[in-house]
């Protein structure tokens, strides 16, 4: 933490002096050090604190490069919040580990298999998700993949309440991973059915033109494998992301997002940068800029109302009391609405909100790692892998203010309970 603090101070000074490349470079080195520190101690590639440190600080490092005209020098409060977000998470995890003993996440061996109940969970989830998708397609009268000239076709492909079940397909591939890791089935047709359900689940994001849902599903599946085996080849994620690149490009074209359209939004200082560099860059870096917009423009805090959005959405209270969700979104550009994990925490409570939320996340991460030491139900790996993806994409959105996140966790919890009962 001392090394990070020194690097952070140097990065802040360089940014204030206008040395943006050096500012970003120092923070990138700090991100690499923080990840290596946890990896070296645990030997675990997807150590939750290491993943969060690498991607939260690494994302900030990219933002510090200031490669877009949308970016500007940050407020001092913004720098303080970004530092405290990492410090709160890191130190809470550290103190918890020293108090209870280092959590290494070693799974206890067992003789019974959960393959059959996991397979049934896959069946139910695939059927529900596919049925919900078909209902939306019939009700709305179109499938986003086959619509041309409408950049926001996916955003409008949404029936309130039903869409949660449609996108629950993202949990089928990680369940398939668990099914085969648990030994699969001696009956060939069940193994073939598991593969068919996985293909169906991955086809739904493609038909919905949802790049995020596709990538999210694959990442959770990979992390589920790593959480179960406690080892993951470091090249597997780059290889899978490379394999997903053609689908990403196809879905970008299907969304009617051509290069001219995207370059007009991103406003890169170097207009000659290829789109496959500028698009990932702006989708990471601009989220930190949006947080700075919030810090500069927010007139007053909302004291918990923003972070309780899942309650308003899942209970339907947002329709009865629209003022609960009628707060402006402070962003650099209306098309770029993704924000960081801590956006709503600051929106609600300012700097104390960021610190408290970071500490809660650090404590939750430690508990998850510790819990895997004596975990018997393999669906527990799915909780771990989802949290790991949320930490990996901490620069992307306010995961825990998103009702879909809690819906996924609820479905995972139901699957865990069923598998525990079904095995018996």
Image (cartoon, grey):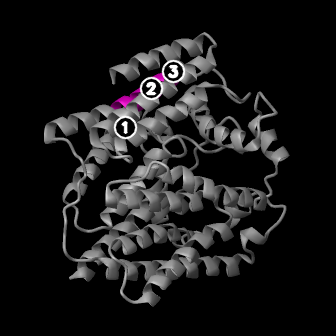
Q: CA distance from mark 3 to mark 1?
A: 23 Å
Region rendered in magenta: 78-88
What quarter of the picture does the C terminus occupy? bottom left
Task: Give the percent coordinates (x, y) of residue 362.
Answer: 32, 41
Q: Nearer the viewer, mark 3 or mark 1?
A: 3
**Which circle's residue, 3 or 1, is located before the other in the chain?**
3
Whether residue 102 is visible to the viewer of this picture, yes or no, is yes
> Circle 1 sits in a helix, a strand or a loop, which is it?
helix
Report x, y in % for residue 370: 22, 50
Measure the alpha-carbon separation of dots 2 and 1.
19 Å
The answer to whether residue 270 is left or right of residue 126 is right
User: Could you say which disc has been placed on residue 30 in the image?
Assistant: 2
Earlier sequence position, callout 2 versus callout 1: 2
| SS of the residue under disc 2 | helix
Q: Which residue is rendered at x = 47% and y = 45% of the image?
A: 392
Image quarter hosting the N terminus: top left
**Which percent across, then down, holds residue 346?**
47, 35
Q: Is residue 242 above or below residue 111?
A: above
Magenta stretch, overall SS: helix
Count the marks: how many?
Answer: 3
Q: Nearer the viewer, residue 269 or 82?
A: 269
The residue where tag 3 is placed is 26
Q: Are marks 3 and 2 in contact (CB under 8 Å)?
A: yes
Residue drawn at x 45%, y 23% as measured from the top left: 80
């Amino acid at each position: 933490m001392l090394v990070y603090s020194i690097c952070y101070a140097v990065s802040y000074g360089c940014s204030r002096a206008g040395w943006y490349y050096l500012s970003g470079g120092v923070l990138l080195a700090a991100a690499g050090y923080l990840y290596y520190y946890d990896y070296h101690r645990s030997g675990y590639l997807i150590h939750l604190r290491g993943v969060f440190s690498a991607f939260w600080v690494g994302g900030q490092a990219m933002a510090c490069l200031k490669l877009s005209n949308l970016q500007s020098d940050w407020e001092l409060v913004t720098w303080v919040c970004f530092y405290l977000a990492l410090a709160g998470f890191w130190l809470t995890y550290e103190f918890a580990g020293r108090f209870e003993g280092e959590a290494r996440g070693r799974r206890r061996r067992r003789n019974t298999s959960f393959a059959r109940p996991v397979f049934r969970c896959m069946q139910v989830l695939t059927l529900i998700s596919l049925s919900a998708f078909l209902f939306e397609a019939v009700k709305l009268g179109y499938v986003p993949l086959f619509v041309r000239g409408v950049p926001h076709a996916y955003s409008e492909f949404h029936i309130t309440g039903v869409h949660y079940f449609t996108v629950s397909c993202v949990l089928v591939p990680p369940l398939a991973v668990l099914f085969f890791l648990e030994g699969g089935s001696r009956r060939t047709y069940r193994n073939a059915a598991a593969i068919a359900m996985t293909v169906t689940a991955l086809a739904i994001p493609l038909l919905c033109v949802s790049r995020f849902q596709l990538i999210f599903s694959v990442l959770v599946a990979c992390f589920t494998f790593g959480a179960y085996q406690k080892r993951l080849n470091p090249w597997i994620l780059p290889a899978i992301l490379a394999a997903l690149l053609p689908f990403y490009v196809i879905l970008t074209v299907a969304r009617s997002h051509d290069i001219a359209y995207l370059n007009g939004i991103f406003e890169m200082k170097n207009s000659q940068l290829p789109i496959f560099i500028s698009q990932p860059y702006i989708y990471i870096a601009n989220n930190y800029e949006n947080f700075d917009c919030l810090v500069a423009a927010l007139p007053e805090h909302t004291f918990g109302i923003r972070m309780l959005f899942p309650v308003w959405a899942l209970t339907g209270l947002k329709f009865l009391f629209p003022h609960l969700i009628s707060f402006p979104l402070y962003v650099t550009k209306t098309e770029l609405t993704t924000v960081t994990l801590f956006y709503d925490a600051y929106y609600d409570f300012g700097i104390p909100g960021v610190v408290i939320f970071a500490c809660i996340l650090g404590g939750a991460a430690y508990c998850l790692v510790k819990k895997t030491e004596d975990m018997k139900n393999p669906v527990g790996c799915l909780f771990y892998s989802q949290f790991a993806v949320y930490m990996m994409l901490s620069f992307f959105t306010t995961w825990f203010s998103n009702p879909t996140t809690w819906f996924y966790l609820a479905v995972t919890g139901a699957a865990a309970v069923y598998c525990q009962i079904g095995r018996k």
